[in-house]
Each structure stands twice: as C-alpha cells, then as structure tokens.
Image (cartoon, rainbow, N blue to C red):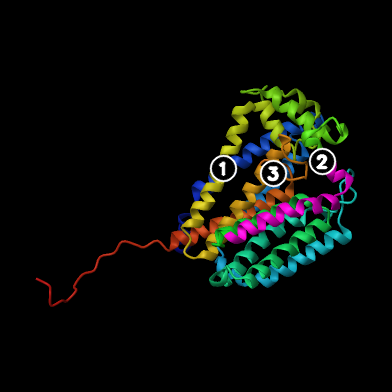
Amino acid sequence: MNKIVASFSYFFRGLDKLFLTLCLFTSAFGVLMVYSAKYHTMAEGALMPSEARTMIIAIALGLIMALIISLIDYDIMCKLWPLWVVISIVLMVLVMLIGKAPASRPDSRVWLDLKVFYFQPSELVKIFFIITFSTHINAVKQNINKIGTLVLLGIHAIIPVLLVMKSGDDGSALVFIFIAIGMIFISGINWKYIAGVAVLALAAIPVIWVKLSSFQKARFIVIVDPDKYPDTAYQQTKGLAAIGKGGFLGTGFLKGTYTQSGAVPVNESDMIFTVIAEELGLLGATFALVLIFLIIIRIISNGKKAINEQAGLMAYGLAVMIAAQTIINVAMCLRVGPVIGITLPFFSAGGSSSLCLYIGLGLALGVYRTNYNQKPQNFRLSSIRSEFRT
C-alpha cells in the first residue's frame, strides 16, 4: 500500500499542474463553443451535438495518453526516431491510397476511415516530426551553420511537407514549414542563412503562383477583392459578419444570429473563432487567444529550463506548432489570410486534432517532469574532518 501511495505521490509531484489545468480549462471552453456552433442541429432530446461529444472523448483519451507519455523518458522516444519516421511515411502513403476526402474537396484525401471514427494522420505526423527533427538538430548542433548540415535538415523537413501536400492538405504542410523554420532558428542558425531563405522565398512567389490551381488562386484574390469570387469569399464574408455582430461583449451564449442559423460554413471547426467572437464578443475572443498564449508561454518556459537542448527543442517545436495554427486560423477568419483548413488549437471540433494535440502536450509535460526531478535537493554535511576546522 505504501508503494502505491509513493508512486502516486511521485506522479503528482512531477506533474505540471498549472499547465495541465490551463490546457483543460481552455479545452472546456472550446467544447462549449463547439456545442454552441452545432446547437441548432441537435435533435430533440439530444444531450449534446455529436461533434462536442467526439471532442470530449478525444480530449479524455488524449489526456490519458499525455499523462502516460509524461512518464516516459523523452530520450527513449528520441532514440526511437526511425520508428516514428516509418510510421509517418506509412500513414501518409495510406491516406493517399485509401484516404477519404470531404465532399467539397474530392482532391483532398486527408482522413483514414477506421470505421469507429475518421482519423487525420497529418495531425499525428506533426508530433512525430517534432520528435525526429529535434533529434536531428541535436545530433548536428555543432555544425548547424554548415551548408551540408542545413541541406540535410531541409531534406528532412521537405519530405513530410511534400507527403502532406500530395494528400491535398496544404494547411498542414504550411504548419510543418513553420515548425521546421522555428526549430532551426532557435537552434542558433546564422542570420545570413535566414536572410538568404527569405530572399529565395520572395523570389519563388511568382513560380508558386503559376503552379497554384485556379481555386487556390481565388482564395488569395478574395482577400483583397471578395467581390470577384463571391462564392469563394462566402465563408469568410459570413464569418466577418458574425464577428462584427458580436461587438465588444457579444450576443450571448447560444444567441448568435449567424452561429445559430448555421450561416457560417464549418463554424464548428475552421471558423470556430467566429462563434467565439459573435457570442462572446471581442472580450471573449481576446480571452480565448490569451489562454492559448499563456499555454505557449508555459511550454517555452519549460523548454528554456530543460536539462538539455534536445528537450528544449521539442518544447519549442510544440510551441511553434500551436502558435502557427492559431495565427493561420485567426488570419483566415479575419480574411487577412486564405482559407486553408487549419483548426484553432483547443477550440476547433475534431477528434484527430484534439487527440494529437494532447499527445504533443504529453511531451511538454515530460520535459517539465524531467526538469522537476533534476532540481537540487537541500542537504547538510556533517562530521567533516579538515585541518582548517576550528
């Protein structure tokens, strides 16, 4: 019995309770917003929309996995990097071969039908990429500014990007790029390389533009000229109207005109920010973003205190992932960026995104636990013999 009590005591002592509480509170906030987004679709007598129920199950399962992962030495997970690479490639090949696409985008095969639920592999591959890329950077950190090293890191990063793009998930591909750039930047790369990549990226814009499909080009054009492609701009136009309707304090929970009429397409997922802004106003939307910001800051703080660079890089990679998805999603809802199907962390509906997000949070909890266990303990020396003793 004493051993069980000691085990539980050890488990809770090394748990980042502040961070976990913050994550669960933010997720609960997100479930409420998804509930509101799909409230008008509920059948009479139903307890909650299926999207909210799925999200709760995914968060609960993800929480259990996060707590288990937090107990595993991250060094072990990093040593298993070949396994994560193989799993990632297999998942992405499967989704390209037998993946399911949404009705509106038959060219975008992003889900695997597991019969019990649909799973989006790219969400899990993001977490595996953070582990493998941090391992790679840590192995070559002494030569990070050598051309050969950067070329290999670039190849490492471009493989998942191309695989995800091939499946039609351009939004996730963009997040991978941000994660890779963020982690390389944090690793201490010379500014001349950063400037060089920036110049190349700008020079590549015309080439990329030519390669885009007419549908993809339209999504960029409507940012500055929504009247040119009103059908393409429809989702963002309605979303902006919902945000404007909310004002400072919002129309009230379950009382949003646009939200409860279903006027904003996919408002439970990609456009969840419009639900928050309409029903809770600028105040509620700001509060939601502050919660995400605090989570990011906590991850970075734990990363800075990490006992080695590899652990810190994993934490930074996770922070970049959450920040990138938040910025892209909000930009999309405010029509300062194109609609590319990126969820808002902790708030958007989706079993895959919620589950895999918590798996990633397990890495952050593991970094904190390792830091906690390495703290020096107070001790006292006695009975020391010395010729200088008086």
Specify the label residue 36 is tagged with.
none
Q: Is residue 329 magenta?
A: no
Circle 3 residues within 10 Å: few <14, some 14–19, many ≥20: many
Q: Is residue 205 magenta?
A: yes
Q: CA distance from mark 2 to mark 1?
A: 28 Å
Would you identify the image quadrant in which residue 34 lies? top right
Residue 346 in picture, x, y percent from top left: 65, 43
The magenta stretch is 192-218
Q: Earlier in the sequence, mark 2 or mark 1?
A: 2
Residue 319 visible in the shown view: yes
Residue that label 1 marks: 293
Residue that label 2 marks: 219
Q: In the picture, which quadrant includes the C terminus?
A: bottom left
The residue type indicated by label 1 comes to Phe
The residue type indicated by label 2 comes to Arg
Q: Mark 1 falls on what kind of element?
A: helix
287 left or right of 163? left
Q: Is residue 387 above or below residue 365?
A: below
Q: Nearer the viewer, residue 261 or 332?
A: 332
In this view, the mark in front (3 or 1): 3
Q: Nearer the viewer, residue 102 or 330?
A: 330
Specify the label residue 328 is tagged with.
3
The residue type indicated by label 3 comes to Ile
Would you identify the image quadrant in which residue 77 lies? bottom right
